[in-house]
Amino acid sequence: MNENLEKHKELSTTSPMSRKRKPQQIVFVIALIAIPLLIIWMYLSPSKEGEPTFEKLQSQTKEKTQLEVMEDMWEHHPGHGPVALELGNLYLQDGQYRKAIQFYRIFLESDTSATGWEVRLDISRAFAALQQPDSAIAELNEILKQSENHPGALYNLGAIEANRGNFSTARRAWETLIETHPADTLAQFASAALPKLNKPDGHP
């Protein structure tokens, strides 16, 4: 009789605990399996048609060149002066001289800075690369109207005129540069090249 009572007590104290533990253990095991499966499904599940995945967007950004990034920016912010200037610089570096001139012009239309007009040096370079020396010189003359004896304009003017065989005009430009900006690196380049211009105009 006592043994039966002891067994009954043992069962009554252990059985409720067992009944409580089992559901908790089952839930814990299910969570261990279900949560990683949910994460894997979210990561690998196909996106809706036309909706790019994060990985795709990330790879597209990495694949784009700086020029393409700025072109995208221009598409969303057309007419923005600093973007136009940067596009002009990038097109010039890329050898797309007509596009460079186009965006430099857009920049000049909206520029209100004190030195923005100096972008004409790059416009002149683009025209020179397109074998249009008259247009290149016209830009340099515009700079010289803004800043008499501008070193960059004088040096480039001398170089373009020398390439055209106008040695007397080239000499005047470089002599002015050397006289007004003797310590400038461009003046030193001009001084070193000046003896080569001691020949009649049109001489090869």
Image (tube, helix red, strand yellow):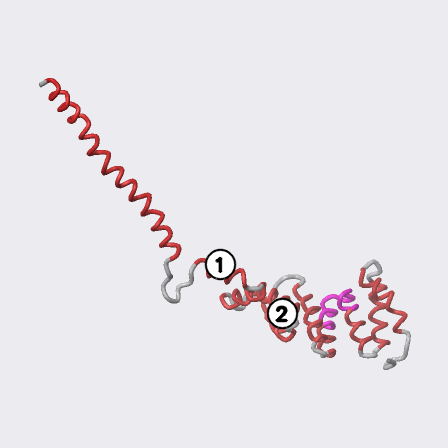
Report the side of 181 relative to 62 (left or right): right
Badge 2 crowding class, 10 Å Cα cut-off, few under 14, some 14 to 19, many 20 or more, is: many
Residue 144 belongs to the span the image colors magenta:
yes
Name the residue type under label 1: Gln
Image depth: mark 2 or mark 1 in front: 1
Disc 1 target residue: 58
Bounds of the magenta span? 140-155
| Residue 115 location (% of width, % of height) | 67, 62
In terms of secondary structure, where does tag 1 sit?
Answer: helix
Q: Which image quadrant is residue 129 in?
A: bottom right
Residue 13 belongs to the span the image colors magenta:
no
Q: Which quadrant of the figure contains the C terminus?
A: bottom right
Report the side of 132 relative to 106 (left or right): right
Residue 91 shows which numbered tag? 2
Report the side of 68 relative to 14 (left or right): right
| Residue 63 location (% of width, % of height) | 54, 63
Nearest to N terminus: mark 2 or mark 1: 1
Residue located farthest toward the left when viewing the structure as drawn: 1
In terms of secondary structure, where does tag 2 sit?
Answer: helix
Name the residue type under label 2: Tyr
Q: Decide: is 35 above or below 108.
A: above
- Of 56 and 97, nearer the camera is 56
At 76% from the left edge and 68% from the top edge, which residue is drawn? 153
Q: Which quadrant of the figure contains the N terminus?
A: top left
| Residue 201 location (% of width, % of height) | 87, 80
- Of 111 and 2, nearer the camera is 2
Badge 1 crowding class, 10 Å Cα cut-off, few under 14, some 14 to 19, many 20 or more, is: few
Residue located farthest toward the bottom when viewing the structure as drawn: 202
| Residue 14 location (% of width, % of height) | 19, 27
Magenta stretch, main secondary structure class: helix
Q: Which image quadrant is residue 8 in?
A: top left
